[in-house]
Image: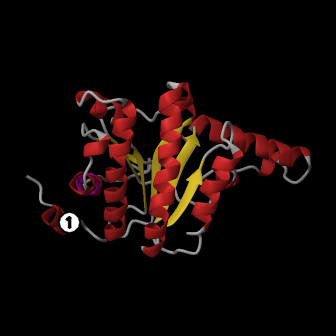
Amino acid sequence: MRDYKTLLEQVDKNNIPKHVSVIMDGNGRWAKKRLQNRLYGHKHGARAVRETIEVCHELGIEYLTLYAFSTENWRRQDSEVSGLLKLILNTLLKEIDELIENNVRVKFIGSKENLDKNYLDKIEKACAKSLANTGLNVNVAFNYGGRREILDAVKSLADKVQKHELKAEDISEEIIAEHLYTANIPDPELMIRTSGEQRLSNYLLWQSAYTEFCFTDVLWPDFSKEDFVTAILNYQKRNRRYGAE
């Protein structure tokens, strides 16, 4: 059995990824194994979110981005979608004060399309309370789609070119990055996906060009601090060459 403290002692503190992204997958399968509906799995996944934030804080990771709700999730049954939206908001409102006390800064990234204005206002007001914090940055990818993000960036750039605020020939990778939802956030060095699936699922497509991937069979509600540190240790064994060799 893996011991958390023993695993922590193996971590090279000089080789900690600045930004870790996570695809929190497997809530539905976890619930099905217990003869419950999918929302039951989402509710129990909140514990894994809390533990992941705690271990990121302990390791000194600067950015954590969590895939909470994708643009494709609207295709699910209405009862699951409404329940998941309510769960995300209620969890944020419940946890925000403690997150602020621990110097955590919370930001939601994604599209505002299809979201109720009153719902958005509550999320934005809660996140605004943490803006002055200087510790771990927790980015919640919410109503997020990688292709939609790039499309929105292209439209914004095209609008600036049309208004003569920008020349087409001046558009660079850096300028494109500045128009993504993740502007001013470094690209993730490590992406973790739970539940055994091995695909990006339209998540951080531009930002993950040189990201290292760690896939685990653990379903998200069972994902522990030990699992997270194991992923970090796996990352530290890799030689990141960026195409140079």
Asked where in the image residue 36 lies, by quadrant, the reply is: top left
Looking at the picture, does residue 163 appear above or below residue 95? Answer: above
Tell whether position 153 is magenta. Answer: no
Name the residue at the left extreme.
1
Q: Nearer the viewer, residue 212 or 116?
A: 116
Dot 1 amino acid type: Leu
Looking at the picture, does residue 15 appear above or below residue 152? Answer: below
Residue occupied by mark 1:
8
Can residue 204 be seen here? The reply is no
Magenta stretch, main secondary structure, is helix
Magenta stretch?
229-234
Tell me how many marks there are. Answer: 1
Q: Nearer the viewer, residue 11 or 174?
A: 11
Can residue 78 be seen here? The reply is yes
Q: Residue 83's x, y, as percent? A: 48, 37
Tell whether position 231 is magenta. Answer: yes
Q: Residue 202's x, y, as percent? A: 52, 35
Q: Is residue 10 left or right of residue 165?
A: left
Q: Nearer the viewer, residue 58 or 87?
A: 87
Name the residue at the right extreme.
163
Q: Residue 26's x, y, as percent? A: 33, 35
Q: Residue 108's x, y, as percent? A: 57, 53
Query: Going 81% across and 42% down the picture, which residue do you hit?
Result: 158
Q: How is the image coloured?
A: secondary structure
Query: Quick one: SS at disc 1?
Result: helix
Q: Is residue 218 left or right of residue 76?
A: left
Query: Going 53% across and 35% down the picture, which residue do you hit?
Result: 82
Query: Going 11% across and 55% down the picture, which residue do you hit?
Result: 2
Asked where in the image residue 40 lies, by quadrant, the reply is: top left
**How packed is label 1: few (under 14 Cα within 10 Å), some, or many (20 or more)?**
some
Q: Is residue 202 left or right of residue 6?
A: right
